[in-house]
Image (cartoon, coloured by chain):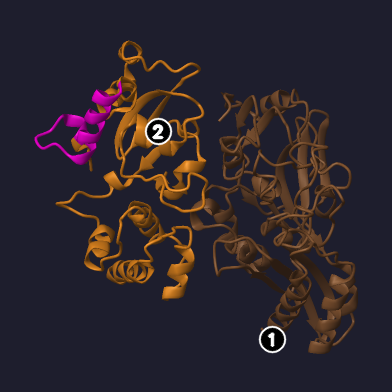
Amino acid sequence: MHTFEFIRPTDQAAAIATAAQSKTAQQGADVRFLGGGTTLIDLMKLSVETPARVLDVNRLPLDKIEAPSDGGLKIGAMVRNSDLANHATVQKNYLVLSQAILQGASAQIRNMATVGGNLLQRTRCVYFRDTAMACNKRQPGSGCPAITGHNRTLAIFGASEHCIATNPSDMCVALAALEATVHIQGPKGSRAVAFGDFHVLPGNTPHRETVLESGDLITHVTLPPPISGSKQLYLKLRDRASYEFALASAAVVLTISNGSVSRARIALGGVGTKPWRAPQAEAALTGKPASDAIFRQAAEAALRGAKPQSENKFKIELAKRCLVHSLRTVTAS
Amino acid sequence: MQNNDHFSESEQPNRRQFLSTAGTVAAGVMAAYSPSHAVTAEAPETAHAAGTTIEGAVPITLRINGRDYSLRIDPRTTLLDCLRETVALTGTKKGCDHGQCGACTVHVNDRRVLSCLNFAVMHDGEEITTIEGLGTPEAMHPMQEAFFTHDAYQCGYCTSGQIMSAVALLKEPCGPDDTAVKELMSGNICRCGAYANITAAIQQVRKQA
């Protein structure tokens, strides 16, 4: 591992001031915030990440789950995944988030991983993780061998000719369906970013994954007030039953009245270069009876426009069945 | 409970002592990693004399199994390497070193974590429990006893991680059936495939509790 200076900032302002000296907050950052370490330390061991300074933000007071006056939920960036998933309010009002987190990683990793860190979880694309290979995300302009290589687990949505890497997060799929907001404190002040705008598509700049700039610190995530009577589910399909990344997953938040869907929020995981909201499926469901035929129509709508790679055409039908099964299960409950 | 036999040049040579002695004879450089030098890590001058000065090392104190260790370590040192190489508590095993196998599971402030994906400096002042702090051969932790009774291992390499995970699981939200236990133990891989017996051992302890 490359050497680095280990710094524990005394407060948020000090952390931001030091991080602002980094040339970027994206791939190649020379200053990195260190949370649970489950992504960053792994990538530092692989020399994919080589920060000169590491800022340990674990002791900043950002580890609270609070109920703001609007009736929603405020989740500190340093809240551990396990604490969030097992929180009584989350299990009661935002079940899809609890389920998504508990289907990700292992109990040990969930005890370490933070909410802020999970928003910045990096792809598991094998070319990105191997410095002997070319990768436009890791080394802009070097090429994307995944397009003609091993791409079974990679994206069918949001890819470009420069990058087809999948976003691996489960938590983020639930946050997309819950329409969360990411709160950022930076050198120029604070701002709130709608969840759908936080991650960016690879386009010509796959090394850029989020809207974060140098010095930006994610302080917390907020959830809107719970939709009363909503039915929620996270279903994850993968190569083994546990401790594996999604091939396809679905986060579903549905409200049914008089046998019809009155409100639908749907996001897919394991298929996109970012957590993939499916507005076409939401539109296909809204105002329609909760039936198998309608569910299949919604799934067809969700996967319209998917562009498979050489090894992952199966994901299209898998994702459709994942969504249909989720809708069937959640409406039967 | 302390079980640092190899710290006290004790009565009977164990395998670990033999290996580190053999290493010292075979190659002097190995001495820097031997347990007998590791205990002097609290005294920088001695460490310097032994040739173990580490550029950029930072002072930290870890409370491991109820005992304080004042150390100077390279910030790159993972908690796992610190436990094994600096403090010479080798019960914690290095499997994949990338958070994929669970062999390195320890408790930090009573929660199970992977010691390979943490820097030791992150835990300055914190409470670490390793398999050595759980029980002794004479007074085993009920989970150790249950693993023994149920033959919940073959080669044994993953066992300390399995047991540390299993002990932490006792205090976590977990459904009553085997499926729930298997799900919460999925972060600990056993290449020998002792899973059925591991599950049985854990369920026995949960029923006793």
Give neighbour class at mark 2: few <14, some 14-19, many 20+ (Cα, 10 Å).
many
B25 in the magenta segment:
yes
Residue annotated with mark 1 = A332
The reply to whether residue B114 is in sight is yes
| Residue type of the residue flagged with mark 2 | Cys
B100 in the magenta segment:
no
Q: Secondary structure under badge 2?
A: helix
Residue annotated with mark 2 = B82
Q: Residue at x 24, y 55 (%)?
A: B141
Quarter of the image with the C terminus of chain A is bottom right
In the image, residue B113 above or below residue A295: above
Q: Please tell me the colour of chain B.
A: orange
Residue A202, horizontal then vertical, whole percent: 84, 48
| Chain letter belonging to callout 2 | B
The residue stretch that appears in magenta: B6-27
Left or right of B160, for residue B136: left
Left or right of A281, for residue A39: left
- Chain in brown in the render: A
